[in-house]
Image (cartoon, rainbow, N blue to C red):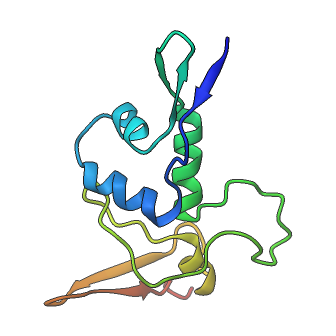
């Protein structure tokens, strides 16, 4: 089957901004509007969800492959800016948690300021 790919699907921060802007539309529609679809020679559009989701993972700086040797290679550098996701969550990426040597299960106390959020790490009780 001969497929024609959509030119220049969105990537990186541009992709994240578009997905957040689209709000509550379906994930398939988000993928389509971000350019992750192909058109068959019969004119049928097919959304490529796997490429879209992989692009989102890359844009967020999440590293799923465990093949790195811990040298911190790859991924985005920390920009110290994040956006609220369409579901209302804030995602703090591995670039930040890595710089702070955080591990799964580390806990934080959240303090809300007038225009900021403070995260204070909760220390484990010494035994």
Image quarter in which the N terminus is found: top right
Q: Is residue 32 above or below residue 72?
A: above
Residue 121, visible in the rendered structure: yes
Q: Which of 104 and 25 is in front in this view?
A: 25
Residue at 27% x, 48% y is: 22
Residue at 40% x, 80% y is: 81
Q: Name, please, the residue furthest toward the left.
A: 114
Q: In this view, does 94 lie above or below 55?
A: below
28 vs 95, left or right, is: left
Q: In this view, does 62 lie above or below 43?
A: below
Q: What is the quadrant of residue 104 in the picture? A: bottom right
92 vs 78, left or right, is: left
Residue 40 position within the rendered picture, expressed as x and y whole percent measured from the top left? 56, 16
Q: Which of 97 and 95 is in front in this view?
A: 95
Residue 6 position within the rendered picture, expressed as x and y whole percent measured from the top left? 53, 36
Residue at 53% x, 56% y is: 11
Image quarter in which the C terminus is found: bottom right
Q: What is the quadrant of residue 38 in the picture? A: top right
Residue 87, visible in the rendered structure: no
Residue 87 position within the rendered picture, expressed as x and y whole percent measured from the top left? 27, 52
Number of marks present in the image shown:
0
Residue 66 position within the rendered picture, expressed as x and y whole percent measured from the top left? 78, 57
Residue at 44% x, 62% y is: 14
88 vs 38, left or right, is: left
């Amino acid at each position: 089957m001969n497929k024609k790919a959509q030119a220049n699907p969105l990537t990186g921060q541009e992709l994240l901004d578009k997905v957040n802007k689209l709000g509550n539309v379906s994930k398939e529609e988000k993928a389509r509007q971000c350019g992750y679809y192909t058109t068959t020679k019969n004119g049928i559009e097919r959304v490529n969800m796997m490429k879209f989701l992989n692009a989102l993972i890359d844009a967020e700086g999440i590293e799923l492959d465990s093949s790195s040797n811990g040298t911190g290679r790859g991924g985005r550098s920390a920009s110290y800016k994040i956006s609220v996701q369409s579901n209302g969550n804030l995602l703090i990426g591995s670039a930040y948690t890595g710089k702070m040597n955080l591990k799964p299960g580390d806990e934080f106390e959240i303090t809300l300021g007038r225009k900021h959020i403070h995260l204070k790490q909760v220390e484990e009780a010494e035994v």
